[in-house]
Image: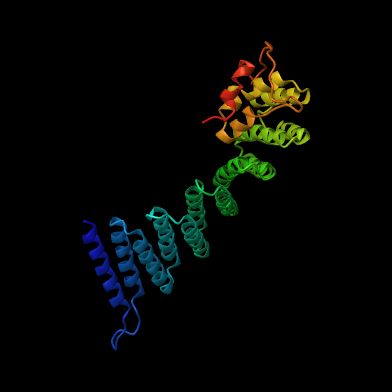
């Protein structure tokens, strides 16, 4: 089966080469037909799992689409070449991302920014398992493209991906900036419940940065959002800030281990369960104080601390 597909691929390449020849009666190469034959060859190589040859065929397809001034189709072919680098027997992810980024630039030149942003998002997902820093860059670029197109919901979602990875990378100052921008977008499209969640994430980040003032400011500013005052989120954050300010380990522990915080996105949940009050030494007292508002939960004995140390999976 594989051998048959490889033979078919070479037949398509032979046809493509004929399309490019000129003669007395054919003055110009037929770039469109050549690109089409290379596209068919690429699919045959891919089906035969000859991914390096498929990549070369896609790049040839892109070359002749470019000659024919069909930039969108050229970009699609280059993006496919990048995908072949991902699935090849020896994956070359940096090279794959380079091809996809090049395709995105061509999508932008062709006036199809939405396609460019979606390709950047796909590239971010590809590289995320091996290079978080590059994934952050790609998600932020994709968000920027969507923002320029006034697609704020999509932009906010991509910024959210970048924010979570920045937390994982412990680049908390940058995460705080990205979260604020994300929150502003959700505010603009009037998705206020998401704004509440972003406020909670901001408080956790600022407290881990040791900046109580910034954390408190985020909560104060959120009271201008419809529905925030008296919400589970606001009660929990007021309780957390009070406990942190008064160095009340039990109060901080109860809030950070409440369902509201423990079931946030995993990166933020880890911030919550690892938060310690200044000078607390990471120990928890055995207190039976009743939980407040949105900060329900039962304190665990000190000897069970290790159950939470690695974060949630």
Position of residue 176 relative to residue 250, above or below, is below
Image: 72 above or below 266: below
> Does residue 87 appear left or right of residue 219 in this picture?
left
Q: Nearer the viewer, residue 154 or 263?
A: 263
Tell me if residue 114 comes above or below residue 10 in the rendering: above
Name the residue located 31 percent from the left edge and 83 percent from the top edge: 22
Which one is nearer the viewer's eye here, 107 or 150?
107
Of residues 32 and 169, the one nearer the viewer is: 169
| Residue 2 x/y as whole percent | 24, 57
Residue 230 in view in this figure: no
Quadrant of the rendered image containing residue 243: top right
Display coloring: rainbow
Asked if residue 245 can be seen in this view, the reply is: yes
Position of 14 relative to 301 (above/below): below
Q: Residue furthest bottom?
A: 24
Residue at point 30% right, 64% down? 41
| Quadrant of image for the N terminus | bottom left
Q: Position of residue 293 (x, y in %)?
A: 66, 18
**How far across and how far down the image is residue 251, in percent?**
70, 19
Residue name at image x 76 percent, y 28 percent: 278
Q: Left or right of 123: which side holds 144? A: right
- Toward which corner of the image does residue 18 lie, by quadrant? bottom left
Which quadrant of the figure has residue 62? bottom left
Q: How many marks?
A: 0
x and y, in percent, of residue 160 in the image? 58, 42
């Amino acid at each position: 089966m594989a051998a048959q597909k490889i033979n078919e691929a070479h037949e398509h390449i032979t046809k493509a080469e004929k399309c490019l020849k000129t003669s007395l009666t054919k003055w110009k190469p037929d770039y469109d037909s050549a690109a089409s034959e290379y596209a068919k060859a690429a699919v045959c190589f891919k089906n035969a799992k000859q991914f390096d040859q498929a990549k070369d065929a896609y790049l040839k397809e892109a070359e002749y689409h470019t000659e024919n001034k069909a930039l969108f189709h050229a970009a699609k072919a280059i993006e496919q070449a990048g995908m072949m680098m991902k699935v090849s027997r020896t994956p070359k992810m940096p090279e794959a991302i380079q091809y996809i980024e090049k395709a995105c630039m061509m999508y932008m030149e062709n006036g199809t920014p939405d396609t460019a942003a979606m390709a950047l998002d796909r590239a971010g997902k590809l590289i995320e398992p091996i290079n978080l820093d590059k994934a952050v860059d790609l998600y932020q670029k994709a968000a920027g493209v969507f923002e320029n197109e006034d697609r704020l919901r999509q932009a906010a979602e991509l910024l959210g991906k970048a924010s979570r990875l920045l937390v994982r990378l412990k680049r908390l100052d940058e995460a705080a900036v990205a979260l604020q921008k994300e929150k502003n977008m959700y505010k603009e499209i009037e998705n206020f419940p998401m704004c509440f969640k972003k406020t909670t994430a901001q408080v956790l980040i600022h407290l881990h940065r040791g900046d109580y003032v910034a954390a408190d400011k985020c909560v104060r500013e959120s009271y201008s959002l419809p529905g925030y005052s008296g919400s589970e989120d606001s009660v929990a954050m007021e309780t957390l800030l009070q406990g942190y300010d008064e160095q009340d380990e039990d109060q901080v522990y109860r809030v950070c281990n409440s369902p509201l915080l423990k079931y946030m996105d995993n990166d933020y949940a880890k911030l919550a369960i690892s938060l310690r009050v200044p000078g607390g030494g990471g120990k928890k007292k055995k207190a039976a104080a009743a939980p407040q508002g949105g900060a329900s939960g039962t304190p665990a004995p000190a000897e069970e601390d290790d159950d939470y140390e690695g974060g949630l999976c």
